[in-house]
Amino acid sequence: MNLALFIILAFLLLALYLGIRSSKGKEMNLEEWTVAGRGFSGIFVFLLMAGEIYTTFSFLGGSGWAYGKGTPALYVMIYITLSYVLSYWLLPSIWKYAKEHNLVSQSDFFVSKYKSPYLGVLVAIVGVIAMIPIIVVQLKGLGIIVSQASYGAISLSTAVWVGAICLTVYVMISGIHGSAWTAVIKDFMMVGIIGFLGVYLPLHYYGSYHDMFQAIYSAKPELLKLPDEGYSVSWFISTVILLVLGFYMWPQVFSSTYTAKSGKVFRRNAIISPLYTLMLLFVFFVGYAAVLKVPGLQGGDVDLALLSLSIQTFDPWFIGIIGGAGLLTALVPGSMILLSASTLLSKNVYKVFVPSAPDERVVKLAKTLVPFIALISVYFTLNEGTTLATISLMGYNIMTQLFPSLIFSLRKRNFVTKQGAATGIIVGLVTVTYITLSGTTIATLFPNIPQGVKDLNIGFIALFINIIVTILVSLMTKKINEKQNNI
């Protein structure tokens, strides 16, 4: 066993230990397993939500996009920062309502707001469909990290299988408690590692940031601007808007707001968190540094930029530390996503059709579903060749379709009906699914429209259709519902 692989294994064992240790002395009922009895302090909520947000995509995908696409990669930093601004007003309202109504999942929120358990089923299914690609991102990233950092001693497929097994055991035993404790170590390590790499590598290879960008400009000037077509200004803006609206729609992020002791936590975090986003600049610096020093990476291999340059530069012991930090960036969000997906299917799908099922059976089913969801994710991980960024964007296109129904539900007088909310979500989901599977673009549908319109993110178009359908169906069904309530 080489030194790097030994260090990575040590990090994995530490994470498993923390997961097992964190659940000791706690009765792991549904509320404790999913939202930790709503007792997390501000620092835990901050690190937990950061743990879900800063994933293997931040570690590998961000540098990969800077390497392969250049300036368009900046959308990541901008949308996350703006999402924190939105959270200042959005999350306290969600937390307050969830606490008053004892909610434990995202679907519970929609069920309670729209008085429709079947809308909750729909929201749960949409959430699970969207979360599978993000679990794929974590497993694929984990496979890349372990395979590369072990210098090929472990193949990517073996690393994915081992990671999925460990992730499954981790979630089934500890629930959200293990994720929170591991997030503490992971966040401190990731900030330190990425900060160091983002400073050292550009200076080591180029002497200064100025010289690095000057060298890139001379060799590949197209990487330092938004292109006129494709990932253009209109794509950039529409993608940022879409992702800001979808940022807190992810079930694992949404339900993690329930864990806080107070709604004030979110306003404090909204002020501090944008500073944390500056870390992503160092991720991009690593990607840019690799452009001329690790040439020739194409397609999905651009995600190897950070690790390839690191292996070329550092001794095995430090590669092991980088690999260990990367492992934790997959383990924390991956565990949260598996937890949320299994909870949604057991509580908001199974229990709707079997309402007499006790909580003990629901928890048992949720834990049983964890390995099945992990197996499905492994299948797609081993048969998916696209980049981490592309997979992540596809999931966002799906999850953002929940935003209109959520934001309307927060109004004191919500005119949107359960029929309108459901129809809008379905139409948005169908639009995204059709376009993704068929490869259709706005340009192929309307070849004569201006280029700026052609480049709009397709999820943005699906969201617009969703809003129109939601409003129209709600207006048509509102009077019918009022008549039924008066009978």
Image (cartoon, helix red, strand yellow):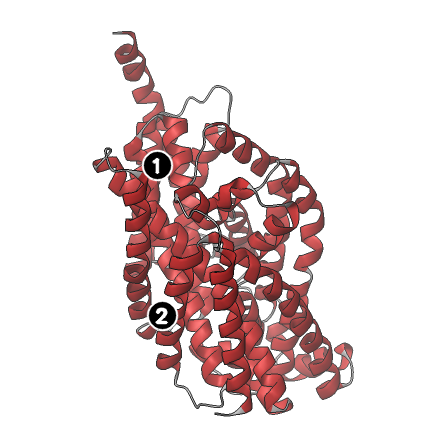
- Which residue is situated farthest in the top direction here? 487
Element on which disc 1 rests: helix
- Which residue is disc 2 drawn over? 165
Above-or-below relation of 318 to 180: below
Residue depth check, mark 1 versus mark 2: number of the one nearer the observer: 2
Give coordinates of residue 320: x percent, y percent: 57, 83
Could you tell whether 80 is left or right of 198 in the image? left
- Which residue is disc 1 drawn over? 424
- Local crowd at mark 1 within 10 Å, few (<14), some, or many (≥20)? many
Please tell me which of labels 1 and 2 falls first in the chain.
2
Residue found 54% across the figure and 75% down from its top: 11
Give coordinates of residue 249: x percent, y percent: 46, 45
Q: Nearer the viewer, residue 479 or 170?
A: 170
Above-or-below relation of 44 to 153: above
| Residue 138 numbered mark, or none | none
Q: Nearer the viewer, residue 299 or 16?
A: 16
Q: Amino acid at mark 1?
A: Gly
Q: Nearer the viewer, residue 387 or 412?
A: 412
Q: Quadrant of residue 419?
A: top left
- Gap in Å between the C-alphas at discs 1 and 2? 37 Å
Residue found 63% across the figure and 71% down from its top: 284
